[in-house]
Amino acid sequence: MRSNLGFFSDEKFRSIFFQTLVVGLFALGLFFVITTTSYNLEKRNIATGWSFLQNPAGFDISFSPFLEFKSTDTHLKVYFVGVLNTLLVSVTGCIAATILGFILGIVRLSSNWLLSRLVYIYVEFSRNVPLLLQIILWYSILIQLPRVKQSLQVLDVFYISNRGLYSPRPIFESGFSYVSIAIVLALISSFLINRWAKKRQDKTGQQFPVFSSSIGLIFIVPLVLFFILGSPLSFEHPELKGFNFKGGLVIRPEFIAMFLALSIYTAAFISEIVRAGIMSVSKGQREASAAIGLKQTWIMRLIIIPQALRVIVPPLTSQYLNLTKNSSLGIAVGYADLVHGFGGISLNQTGQAIECMAIVMATYLSISLTISFFMNIYNRSIQFKEK
Amino acid sequence: MKKLLSIFAVVAFAFSAHAGTLDDVKNRGFLKCGVTTGLAGFAAPDDSGEWAGLDADMCRAVAVAVFGDRSKVEFITTTGKSRFPTLASGEVDMLARNTTWTISRDVNLGFEFVGVNFYDGQGFMVPSALGVSSATELDGATVCIQTGTTTELNLADFFRLNGISYEALPIETNDEGKENLFAGRCDVYTTDASGLSSTRAAASNPDKWVVLPEIISKEPLGPLVRHGDHQWGDVVRWSLNAMIIAEELGITSENVDAQMSSNVPEVLRLLGVEGNYGEMLELSNDWAYQIIKQIGNYSESYEANVGPDTPLEIARGLNALWTQGGILYAPPFR
């Protein structure tokens, strides 16, 4: 009896046995799903394969700010347009949500009763109303703006209508490249100055006006160069011709609705994360910094925020992931993202549901993993370093 | 490995193999029919909440053929995009969702179109205030277009062919299209001409909208089923044909009882007085009689839902019988 159970009483063996069993069952299940699917696809005469990616799409996508898209382009290009549009709304949304979230999180802790209550109401409202409703709400508001022929004119150059916000498009003439180079050089040198000043302060305690000198480098030097070169920049103004404005830059209401809804919704969560992070720094730290005579803004910037960041960054990462995945709701207002274009229209026109969905899922997975990867690097860099 | 694979194939077969759709429907006790999310005249809930329209009648006709009862239908709404997966997965038994019969849908998607219940074509609708009289004047316009449809592809072709540009505003449902068009987010709405008439009829002031004369495509709309279940396909096909043949023979819901004692052989065959055509379809022998009695012939359904006396005001045109200048034609009932 004992000899039969001998293996099982060994904890190591038991552990390996069950793990192998679970992995084996999972693989078997996966295999079953795949064979069943391919069997049923074949039985229903549904073609499979990836060759459809090279077929012409046959439909048009109007919102494609980075790539020119024509109806003769392939489904593969539909995919790239979708990925770029998803990234556009995700990246701009993450930036706006972070800025708004930090400001709101700090204001929420303010001793001003009214301000703190207002932020409280904002946070509770926007994180407790489903995001989809917020997107539709913003879109409904935006399409109630004046019609294109009665556009509101702002500052003589901007036009606002329910077709979007039209603004002049900058046209860079020859010589402008020098200005761009100057800006890049200024950015690099202010970064170096910052490092040098920090080192010097660590060594000698002397301070250097890093902020004002950087501003001078980044703004004034290129600006002077710009005028010396004879202002090599002009603007193409939007003009109402026929049905629509022609020329200029346009931001579509579909994008604005997505951007507003995503950043306002996520900012509510981020502000709570920031608040939690700041509150996690013990009160003694603030009192001690005040005791050695630091200014209020310095206390926040030098003492509180660096310590709070360690608590803030991990949940912040998951908010970025949420925002990116939530951008797939763009389909509700016709925002031409990955799910709408490739995972929707291409899928429907070709009927290759499994292939399209697999590609879309793999893409979201890669985007999410990339965000996690960089946020993890950042997280390691701000952790408390033991020397 | 090969053996394992074949075992899986057998198991998979056991999971997917089911009795024919007709038996499924009979066992369930009602028909599941996929329709639009609401397109007046084709399938939309009426004032009393009952589904009404040409496509809704198609669903009811099949329910009557199977159960002899027009109420034995569950209407399941589908968007332009969800309709095909809904049918392929077996969530509905058939689609009657103003769907265009094309080769890729018939062959590549694995469906079977059983006939045409409305011959349509794609058109454009604009506000009359724009003063546009032809679709070729639409250069630079913003066009509302339902995604996942043949109209989307026709639109791209039409503008490319005419060398004019447009901006597409993709929408999911007809209601979304209406909302965007009425708000002026788009200048033009394009879909099947019948759909435009339906949308126009639903506007607060229909005179403010004009349907442009161009018809840029053939859109034969018809009911469809999953490919491979021929028995079920036959039931749906002949439910439609029975309505068309009834019109040819002059049988209406009013005079169908009197026609039972007709001396025209085809009338007697259709109504089940002679022959056993119902049995061939595994239906009761009075299935066609019940369709005509409870739903009416094609003409009655047409006039009640989309004809000139309805808000849609669509003349019979192509949809008239082949004997009356149209192309509506059903194979003989014998």
Image: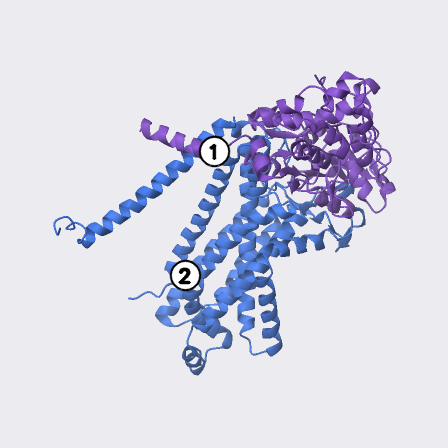
Against A330, residue A134 (above or below) is: below
Q: Which residue is mark 2?
A: A195
**Distance between mark 1 and mark 2 Cα atoms:** 67 Å
Q: Residues within 10 Å of mark 1 (few under 14, many from 20)?
A: some
Task: Report the chain holding disc 1.
Answer: B
Residue A60 in picture, x, y percent from top left? 64, 34
Against B290, residue B45 (above or below) is: below
- Callout 2, which amino acid? Arg
For the image shown, how many numbered marks are present on the structure? 2
Q: Which residue is mark 1?
A: B16
Q: Secondary structure at mark 2?
A: helix
Q: Residues within 10 Å of mark 2 (few under 14, many from 20)?
A: few
Is residue A214 shown left or right of residue A288?
Answer: right
Q: Give the chain letter for blue.
A: A
Work out which quarter of the rendered image holds the C terminus of chain A and state it. Answer: bottom left
Task: Identify the hue of chain B.
Answer: purple
Query: For the view shown, which residue lies furthest in the bottom direction?
Result: A291
- Callout 1, which amino acid? Ser
